[in-house]
Image: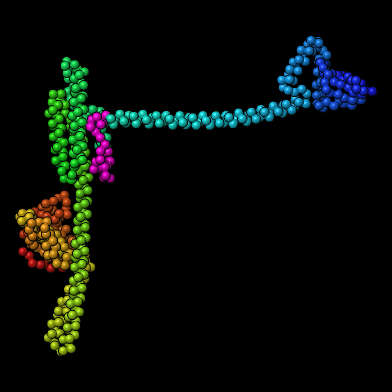
C-alpha cells in the first residue's frame, strides 16, 4: 500500500480516506488506494497551495492557527466561497457584475453628460431671454417716456412710399432721440418756487413736459390732416404753435428748440411729398384714361367714316355703270370726279387709322371762364376736331371755347410738344404739365416761329377766328 499523503486520514469506512484541513474534517474523501483524491480543485497548483497551507499551519501554534483559521473562515463566509472551486466561479461572477456595473455607470455618465449639456443650453437660452426681456423693458420704459412727451406711433402718409419710408424712419428716430436727451425744449436754470430750488426745477420740468406734449399733439394732427397742396399752411400752423409756447413759457424762458421744430416740419414735408406724388399719379392715370377714351372715340369715328365712304363709293359705282350704259358722257365724267373724291377720302381715313400721331392741333381760349390772355394748346385725333372743342366747353365751364387756330398735321403729337416747350415759361400750372393752359395771346402763338417736323407732314388749315 502506498504512503498516505499528508492531511488524509483513514475513516471508519473501509478503504476510504478523509481530508483534515487543520481545523476540521471536510467533505472531501478518497479511496485508500494510491489514486489521487477527487477534489473539486484538480490542478496541481491547488494541491501545492493546499500543501503549503498545511505546512504553514503546522508551524503556527494552536492559538495562532485557530485565529488564522477564523480569519480565513470569515473571508470564505464573506465571499460565499466555501470551496476552492467556488473561487473561480465567484471571480467570474464578480467580474461579470463589475462589467455590468461598469456599463451601467458608463450609461449613467453618458446620460448625466447629456443632461448637463441640455441644462447648459437651457441656461444659455434663459440668459438670452433675460437679455431680451431687459431690452424690452428698456424699450417699454423709453416708449412710456415718449408717450409722456406726446410722441405716439401713428400712421404716416410717407410710410407707404418706397423712397420716403427710410427717410421717415430716420427722422422719427432723430425726433425720439432729441426728446430722450431733452433737446426738444430749452428753459431757464436756477428757477425758484417759494424760495425752493427743488420746487422750481420740478415746476420747470412739469411745464416743459406739458407744453412739449401739446406741441407734439399739434404736429401729429397736422400730419394726419395733411392734404396735397396745403404744406405751407400746415407748416405755418405748427410754427405758430411753437411761437405761442414761447410766449406762454416766457416766465421760465421755455421754448421749442429750432432743431426740434425743423425736424417736425421735415416730417410734414415728407407727408406732403408722398401725397403730392399720389395725387400726380392719380391725375396721370385720369389723363391716360381720358387719352384712351379719346383714342377709342377717334377710332370709332374713323371706322364709321370708312363704312360710310364705302357705301357712298358703292352707290357711285352703280350710278357710273348706269350712266355708262345710257351713254351720258357728261354724267360719267361728273360721277368719276365724285368717285375720285371718295377714293381720296377713303385713303385719308386709312392713313389716319394707320398713323396714330396724325391729328389736329388747336389753339382755343375762354375769356368768360379764364379771363383774357389765357389760351389752351392741345391736339385731337378726332375726325371732326370741333367735337373735341365742344366737349371741352361742356358743363365744367360756364362759357364755350373760342377757336383761334386749328390745323391738321401728320405728327400732331410732335407739333403740340414743340408748342408746349416754346411757351413753357408762360405755363400756368408748372407742377402738373398735363394742364395745357398758357398765359399768352393767340396772336403771340401765330407770330412764334414753328419748327418744321423732320418728315415735313401735311398741314391742312381750318377756319380761324
Residue drawn 13% across and 28% down? 248
Residue drawn 17% across and 23% down? 188
Please say if 132 is above or below 434: above
Direction right: furthest residue? 1
Q: In the picture, which quadrant includes the N terminus? A: top right
In the foreground, 8 or 345: 8
Q: In the visual, does 47 lie left or right of 272?
A: right
Please say if 58 is above or below 133: above
Residue drawn 20% across and 61% down? 293
Q: Would residue 197 be seen by someone viewing this image from the given angle?
A: yes
Q: In the visual, does 455 lie left or right of 136?
A: left
Direction front: furthest residue? 12
Residue drawn 20% across and 19% down? 199
Q: How is the image coloured?
A: rainbow
Q: In the picture, which quadrant includes the C terminus? A: bottom left
Query: On the image, which quarter does residue 176 sit in?
Result: top left
- On whether residue 152 falls in the magenta region, the answer is yes
Q: Would residue 362 be seen by someone viewing this image from the given angle?
A: no
Query: On the image, which quarter does residue 384 sit in?
Result: bottom left
In the rendered structure, which segment of residues is drawn in magenta? Answer: 145-169
Amino acid at each position: 500500500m502506498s504512503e498516505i499523503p499528508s492531511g488524509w486520514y483513514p475513516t471508519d469506512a473501509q478503504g476510504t480516506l478523509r481530508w483534515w484541513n487543520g481545523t476540521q474534517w471536510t467533505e472531501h474523501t478518497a479511496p485508500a488506494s494510491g489514486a489521487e483524491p477527487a477534489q473539486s480543485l484538480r490542478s496541481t497548483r491547488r494541491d501545492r497551495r493546499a500543501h503549503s497551507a498545511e505546512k504553514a499551519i503546522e508551524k503556527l501554534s494552536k492559538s495562532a492557527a485557530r485565529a488564522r483559521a477564523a480569519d480565513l473562515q470569515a473571508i470564505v463566509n464573506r465571499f460565499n466561497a466555501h470551496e476552492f472551486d467556488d473561487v473561480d466561479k465567484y471571480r467570474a461572477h464578480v467580474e461579470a457584475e463589475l462589467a455590468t456595473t461598469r456599463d451601467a455607470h458608463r450609461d449613467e455618465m453618458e446620460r448625466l453628460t447629456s443632461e448637463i449639456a441640455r441644462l447648459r443650453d437651457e441656461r444659455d437660452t434663459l440668459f438670452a431671454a433675460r437679455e431680451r426681456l431687459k431690452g424690452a423693458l428698456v424699450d417699454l420704459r423709453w416708449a412710456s417716456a415718449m408717450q409722456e412727451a406726446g410722441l405716439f406711433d401713428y400712421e404716416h402718409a410717407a410710410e407707404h412710399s418706397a423712397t420716403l419710408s427710410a427717410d421717415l424712419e430716420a427722422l422719427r428716430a432723430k425726433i425720439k432721440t432729441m426728446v430722450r436727451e431733452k433737446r426738444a425744449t430749452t428753459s431757464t436754470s436756477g428757477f425758484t418756487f417759494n424760495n425752493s430750488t427743488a420746487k422750481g426745477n420740478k415746476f420747470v420740468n412739469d411745464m416743459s413736459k406739458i407744453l412739449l406734449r401739446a406741441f407734439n399733439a399739434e404736429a401729429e394732427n397736422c400730419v394726419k390732416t395733411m392734404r396735397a397742396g396745403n404744406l405751407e399752411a400746415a407748416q405755418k400752423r405748427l410754427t405758430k404753435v411753437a411761437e405761442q409756447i414761447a410766449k406762454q413759457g416766457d416766465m421760465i424762458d421755455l421754448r421749442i428748440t429750432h432743431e426740434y421744430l425743423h425736424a417736425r416740419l421735415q416730417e410734414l414735408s415728407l407727408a406732403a411729398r408722398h401725397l403730392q406724388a399720389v395725387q400726380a399719379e392719380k391725375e396721370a392715370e385720369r389723363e391716360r384714361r381720358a387719352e384712351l377714351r379719346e383714342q377709342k372715340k377717334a377710332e370709332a369715328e374713323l371706322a364709321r367714316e370708312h363704312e360710310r365712304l364705302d357705301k357712298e363709293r358703292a352707290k357711285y359705282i352703280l350710278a357710273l355703270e348706269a350712266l355708262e350704259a345710257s351713254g351720258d358722257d357728261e354724267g360719267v365724267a361728273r360721277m368719276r370726279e365724285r368717285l375720285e373724291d371718295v377714293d381720296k377720302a377713303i385713303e385719308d381715313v386709312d392713313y389716319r387709322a394707320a398713323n396714330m400721331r396724325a391729328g389736329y392741333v388747336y389753339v382755343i381760349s375762354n375769356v368768360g371762364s379764364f379771363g383774357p390772355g389765357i389760351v389752351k394748346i392741345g391736339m385731337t385725333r378726332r375726325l371732326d376736331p370741333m367735337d373735341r372743342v365742344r366737349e371741352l366747353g361742356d358743363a365744367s365751364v360756364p362759357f364755350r371755347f373760342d377757336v383761334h387756330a386749328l390745323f391738321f398735321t401728320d405728327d400732331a403729337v410732335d407739333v403740340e410738344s414743340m408748342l408746349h416747350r416754346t411757351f413753357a415759361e408762360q405755363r400756368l400750372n408748372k407742377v402738373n404739365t398735363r394742364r395745357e393752359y398758357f398765359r399768352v395771346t393767340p396772336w403771340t402763338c401765330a407770330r412764334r416761329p414753328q419748327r418744321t417736323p423732320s418728315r415735313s407732314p401735311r398741314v391742312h388749315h381750318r377756319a380761324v377766328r
